[in-house]
Image: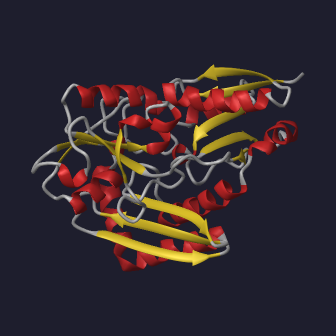
Amino acid sequence: MALLRIGSRGSQLALWQANHIKALLEQHRNRVEIEIIKTTGDKITNVSLAQVGTKGMFTKEIEEALAEKRVDLAVHSLKDLPTEISSAFEIAAIPPREDARDVFCSSTYAGLRELPNRARVGTSSLRRQAQLKALRPDLEIRPLRGNVDSRLRKLGAGEYDAVILAASGLNRLGKGGCIRQLFSATVMCPAAGQGALAVEIRKDDSVVGQQVAFLDDKAARIATTCERSLLNRLGGGCQVPIGAFAEVINGRLHLEAIVARPDGTEVLRESGVGDDPVQLGGMVGEALLRRGGDAILQEVYGKTVVVPEQP
């Protein structure tokens, strides 16, 4: 019986994800262990994510362990994985996707429209902030870091009137009851890859590749490939105000995407339909750039990205 070592971050959600993959692999007669690896993103807790200019800040150290053969595979949230990964690695599987949508959570209010003027809403995502401000310019957007439990505790303690989170994380941790409103992609476009997991391996490791191949889901692979193609065309990471959501409808791939100014004064939306996920993502990305997305992104990169101190 083979032993497979999974590299994972140590957060509650990351460990749920790693244990989920572990259980599936064990059903196929593998022995599986999980190694917890602390990443740059876990170490930098006093700066909002939008200010951290390190691509792969939640994956770099895990990939290093993979390269050094301390682990055999890595389990990531796909949205944390840069669109361009080292040629030494590959995404061997993208399992069936959880709900990709963003959600509204509040102890008092039933939805975004019910929030009073200048209500305090928690998020550290420029993408969410931009779309919230476009919908409700009066809102006071406040930074929100920490794992799902700590974010919900801060909400319950009254530090925020509402927080915006990913449906996938809440559902996976059994906290879906906190959700008061689900946002459609046309109202709050999610991050590329949100709700999907990535199983990453060394590219030359055909043995592990064969062992994890059954985890790959065709629909999740096609949709997220399209979203990541758009993100790659825009040159963005998961911390910039770009949203993308693709799904197959009646046999064809549909993509919704946005580029926005962080203050919400300008939100560019584009959509497209196609059959080739890479081509469709690139086409919609190009349309956004032509309409002014290039200027928005240059301004964002120039003004918000700082180089963090080494942890």
Residue 269 picture location, percent across and down: 38, 72
Question: Is 177 on the left-hand or right-hand side of 261?
Answer: right
Is 1 or 205 nearer to us in this picture? 1
Which residue is at 69% across, 41% downward? 200
Evaluate whether residue 311 shows in this view.
no
Question: Is 282 on the left-hand or right-hand side of 239?
Answer: right
Classify 78 as above or below 69.
below
Task: Look at the image and tell me in which quarter the C terminus lies.
Answer: top left
Which residue is at 18% across, 51% downward? 114
Question: What is the quadrant of residue 83 in the picture?
Answer: bottom right
Question: How many numbered discs sit on the rendered protein?
Answer: 0
Q: Identify the colour scheme used.
A: secondary structure
Evaluate whether residue 31 shows in this view.
yes
Task: Look at the image and tell me in which quarter the N terminus lies.
Answer: top right
Which residue is at 82% across, 41% downward? 209
Question: What is the quadrant of residue 227 in the picture?
Answer: bottom right
Residue 217 picture location, percent across and down: 71, 51
Residue 99 picture location, percent across and down: 52, 49
Residue 44 picture location, percent across and down: 38, 30
